[in-house]
C-alpha cells in the first residue's frame, strides 16, 4: 500500500525560501575578495552626479587656448574646480578651440571614458562636446584592513589631446587649471585660492611684474595652489611664511613629524597646496614668492603676496614695494 | 701583643663577589653609549647568512651589461631581489663582463667590504667572483630612546665600478635592479612587482611601444617599483591610480596626514614603490604610466598598466587601446 | 517722605569690579580671531633679543664673498647659526664687501625690515651695518584648533641683494650658510654639524678631493645639513647610512610611516638635515657622500664621511681609502 503524503502549504514556501537563499549565496560569490566600499569598476557615472559644470575650451589670441565657464571667458589657468570628498561631478567640455581637446584630471576617480586621452578615445574634436565624470571618495578601510586613502588633495586638470599623445601642445597653449578636493573637515580659506602655475620660466606665461598678486588681510586664512607644467623643474619659495609638506600643507597634530618648508622642489604635473595665516607673526607687507632657481627668478619668475592690514588697507611700506616691483622690473 | 683576627668563611666570598661586580662594570664600560641592538660595527657577515644568491654580470650585445641569475640570462633591469627585515643575504657576483664590476646596494646594512666601490677596494675584475653581504634589520629603540628605523623600503642595487669612480658607465650599460625590503607585516602583492627604471629619456632603454606592460586582474594588489638612474630628473605619473608618499606607498592609519599623489618628482638613484588595487573604483582598461616631463613623454617615455577583468580577460576597450599603443607610436 | 538708602561699603567695590570686568572685555576685543600666541604682526624686535651676533660680509680673493664672525675670517659656507625654539636673535651684518649685501633667512620669523631684499629696502651698501632680527617660535594650537608649526628645521641664510633682485650674484659668490633651529627636545649631535652646500657641480665651490671631510668616531651622533643653491638639481647620497624624510631626519615613533632614504632630490634653496649614528651596524671606514647625478659625481661632486674607531683612530682601511681619494682624483 502506498501512503501518499498529504500536501502541506508550508512545503512550497520552504522550497521557495531555500531557493532564494541559495540564489543569494551564488549571486554574492563574485564579490568575495572585493573591497567593501564599492565594486572596483564603479566610479560614479553621469546618472548620479551631484553637480554639473560646463567648461569651454577656446583659443585666446594666436597662440593660447584656455578653459572658461562661459563663452569668451577662457582664462589661463582655467577656472579653479572644487569638490568635497563624496561628491561626483560631471564636467561637460565644449571644445570651441581649433584642435582636439580633452580634460584629464589628477587625483580623482574616473573610468576610462573620462580619462581624456587618445589612447582611451576620450578626446573630442573642435565643435564637439563631451562629459567627463569625476568622483571624489572618502577614505575608508578595505576588507583586508589596509587604508584606501580619500581623494582630498591639491590636484589639477589639463588637456591630454591637442596635437599629440600627451597634450604637450595643449599644456603649452594654457589648457590647465586647479582641482581642489577637500576632506569634510578641512578648513576653508577666507579668500579665493591663489593658483600659481609654473611653466617654462613663467607663472602661467607671465613674468614679473605681471605675475599674479595674491592678496589678503592680516590674519586671514589664505590658500596657495602651486602646479608645475611643461619640461622644467622649479623650487617654489614664499617669503615670511611656511607650510608642512603634507597632504593639506598643515600639521594635523602637535606630534606630526612632517617637514616644515618654505621652499619646495617641483616638477611637471606635480601639484601641492597649503594654507597660511596671512602675516602671522611677521605682519603686513609685500612678501615675495618666486622660483628659487636663480636664473628662473632673474628671468622674472617672481610675484607678490600682498598682506594688507586687518581692515584691508595697503600699508605705506607695502604700497612702496608694490610700486617698486611694478616699476622696477625689466624696463 | 698582636691580636690576630680569626678567619671567617664569608671574607673570601665577599671579596669574590666584589671582584665579580667590579669586573662586570669594567667589562661593560665600552658598551656605554652604544645601541642595545648590536655592536655598531657588526652587520651580519658571510658566516651567518639566511640566503645565498648568485648574480652573473654579463655583456648583452655590444653596448649593454646586465645582471642575471644564470649564465646567459642577464636582463635590464636585473633580477628583483627581495628581503625581509631580519634577514641577511650573501650575493655572490660572478663578473663575466668585460670590465670591472660590483654590487652597491641602497638601504641595507653592509660593511665597507660590501660597499662595492673602488674607494673601498670592493670592485672585481672580469672573470672574478666576490660575495657581497647585505643585512636588513628591524626597527627598534636605541638606548637613548631614539628610533633606529628598520631597513624596509623600495631600494635598488647597481654597479659602482665600471670604468670610473661612480659606476656611470655601468649604470648606462644597464647594471641595476630593484631591491625590495619588507617589514614583517607588509602586505605582499598578488603578482610580480612591476619594476620601472627611468634613465635618460627611456624606461630601462626602452621607448614606447616597447616599454614594459604591467599586468594584473581587476582587484589584484599590484606593486610598482620606480627607480631613476643617470643624469635626468623625471616625474612619474600613473593614470587612474594614486599612492601615498610614504615608506610603503600606503597610509598606515586613517589619520595619517601624508600626501596622496599620482605624480612624483624623482632624480638619479631615487627609488620609491607602492601598491595599488588594480582598477579600484575605475575599472579595467589600458591605463597609461608615463614621465610627465612633456618632452620625455613625447620621446616615448610611456607605457601601459593593463588591468584585465576579474577572470583575467582583456576587455575589448583595453585590447583596442593596446593595439593603438603598439601600432601608433613612432612609426 | 523719601527714604534714602543707606550707604553700603560693598557698593563702590561692586562698581569697581564691574568696571574692571567691562574694561577687560573691551581690552581683549581686538584679540578675537587672532592666534593665542602673539599678535600676528609681532615677531620679536631688537629690544627683546636673547642673543646678539655679528657677521661680516667680506670679499675672498677676486670672485668670492663670504660671511664670517670676525674680520678676515669669512668662510664659504658662512658660520653655522643655531637657535632654539623660543629664541630671538639679532644678527648685525657689517657689510665690508664691495657691493650691496643682506641676510635673508629661511624658516624663521622676521618682519619686512629683516627680509633682506631690495623690495623691502633691507639691503645695505658697502661699509654699512644693519641688524636683522630672527625669531624661532614653538609650536602651538591656534584658537581655531589648527596647529601652528614650530620653527624647528634645517634652514639657511643667504644674500638677496648683490647686483640684482634675487641675490644670484651673492649666492654664486658664496654668501650663504646654515641656520639650524632646534625644538627643545631635539637631540644634539656629538660633533660639529657637517654642512654641505650643493651649488653648480660642486660642494661650496670645491670638487673632489678638496670637498669637506665629515669626521666622527664610531657611535657618535653626527649631524648633516645639506643645502642647495644656484640653478641645478641634485640628488644627495650617503653610503652606509640612512635617514627619515621628516623634519628632523628621524622617526619620532616606531609607527611613523615616513620614508627612510639614503638619496634625496634637492633643488635650489632646498635644505634638509639629519643625524646618523656614525658607523651604526656598518663599522668604521671612509664612507662616500656624493651627488648621484652621474655627471655631477664624475665632475667631482663627492666627498668622505670618515668614521674613525671608538677611540678616534683612523682604521688602516679608512686611511688607505683617504689616501686613494686624495691622490686619485682629477690629476
Image (spheres, coloured by chain):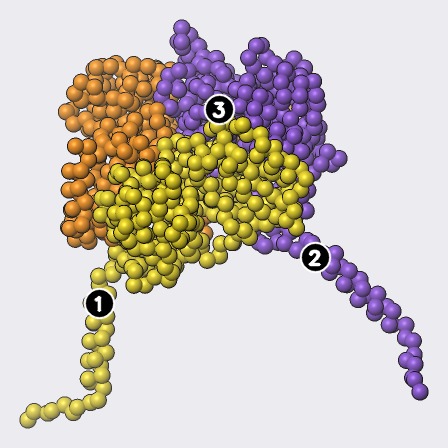
Chain colours: A orange, B purple, C yellow
Identify which residue is drawn at 61% across, 32% down.
Answer: C324
Closer to the camera in the image, A91 or B226? B226
Q: Are marks 2 and 3 on the same chain?
A: yes
Closer to the camera in the image, A175 or B294? B294
Judging from the image, what secondary structure is the residue with disc 3 in? loop
Q: Residues within 10 Å of mark 2 (few under 14, many from 20)?
A: few
Marks 1 and 2: which is nearer the front? 2
Identify which residue is drawn at 48% across, 38% down.
Answer: B246
Chain ID, mark 1: C
Residue C78's spot in the image, x, y percent?
A: 41, 46
Dot placed on the residue nearer the N-terminal end, 2 or 3: 2
Chain ID, mark 2: B
Judging from the image, what secondary structure is the residue with disc 1 in? helix
Say whether residue A180 is visible. no
Q: CA distance from mark 1 to mark 3?
A: 63 Å
Residue C198's spot in the image, x, y percent?
A: 43, 36
Can you name the residue that lies furthest to the bottom here?
Answer: C1
Residue matched to label 3: B230
Residue A233's spot in the image, x, y percent?
A: 36, 29
Query: Where is residue C183, by image quadrant?
Result: bottom left
Task: Identify the disc placed on residue B54.
Answer: none
Q: Residues within 10 Å of mark 1 (few under 14, many from 20)?
A: few
Can you name the residue that lies furthest to the top here?
Answer: B331
Left of A156 or right of it: where is C208?
Answer: right
Q: CA distance from mark 1 to mark 2?
A: 62 Å
Identify which residue is drawn at 55% across, 12% down.
Answer: B63
Identify which residue is drawn at 54% across, 41% down.
Answer: C213
Q: Residues within 10 Å of mark 3 (few under 14, many from 20)?
A: many
Amino acid at each position: 500500500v502506498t501512503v501518499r503524503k498529504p500536501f502541506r502549504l508550508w512545503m512550497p514556501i520552504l522550497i521557495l525560501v531555500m531557493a532564494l537563499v541559495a540564489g543569494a549565496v551564488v549571486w554574492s560569490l563574485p564579490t568575495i575578495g572585493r573591497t567593501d566600499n564599492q565594486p572596483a569598476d564603479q566610479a560614479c557615472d553621469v546618472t548620479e552626479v551631484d553637480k554639473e559644470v560646463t567648461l569651454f575650451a577656446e583659443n585666446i589670441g594666436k597662440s593660447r587656448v584656455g578653459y572658461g565657464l562661459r563663452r569668451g571667458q577662457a582664462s589661463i589657468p582655467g577656472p579653479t574646480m572644487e569638490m568635497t570628498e563624496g561628491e561626483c561631478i560631471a564636467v561637460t567640455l565644449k571644445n570651441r578651440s581649433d584642435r582636439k581637446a580633452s580634460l584629464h584630471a589628477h587625483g580623482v576617480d574616473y573610468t576610462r571614458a573620462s580619462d581624456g586621452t587618445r589612447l582611451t578615445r576620450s578626446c573630442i574634436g573642435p565643435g564637439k562636446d563631451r562629459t567627463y565624470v569625476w568622483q571624489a571618495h572618502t577614505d575608508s578601510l578595505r576588507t583586508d584592513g589596509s587604508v584606501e586613502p580619500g581623494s582630498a588633495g591639491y590636484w589639477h586638470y589639463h588637456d591630454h589631446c591637442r596635437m599629440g599623445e600627451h597634450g604637450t601642445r595643449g599644456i603649452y597653449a594654457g589648457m590647465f587649471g586647479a582641482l581642489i578636493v577637500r576632506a569634510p573637515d578641512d578648513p576653508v580659506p577666507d579668500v579665493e585660492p591663489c593658483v600659481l602655475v609654473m611653466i617654462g620660466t613663467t607663472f602661467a606665461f607671465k613674468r614679473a611684474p605681471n605675475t599674479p598678486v595674491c592678496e589678503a588681510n592680516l590674519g586671514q586664512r589664505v590658500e596657495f595652489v602651486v602646479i608645475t607644467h611643461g619640461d622644467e623643474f622649479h623650487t617654489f619659495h614664499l617669503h615670511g611664511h611656511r607650510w608642512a609638506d603634507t597632504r593639506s600643507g598643515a600639521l594635523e597634530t602637535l606630534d606630526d613629524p612632517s617637514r616644515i618648508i618654505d621652499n619646495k622642489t617641483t616638477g611637471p604635473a606635480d601639484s601641492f597646496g597649503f594654507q597660511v595665516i596671512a602675516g602671522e607673526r611677521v605682519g603686513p607687507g609685500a612678501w615675495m614668492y618666486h622660483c628659487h632657481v636663480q636664473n628662473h627668478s632673474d628671468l622674472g619668475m617672481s610675484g607678490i603676496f600682498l598682506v594688507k592690514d586687518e581692515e584691508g588697507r595697503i600699508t605705506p611700506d607695502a604700497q612702496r614695494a608694490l610700486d617698486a616691483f611694478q616699476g622696477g622690473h625689466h624696463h
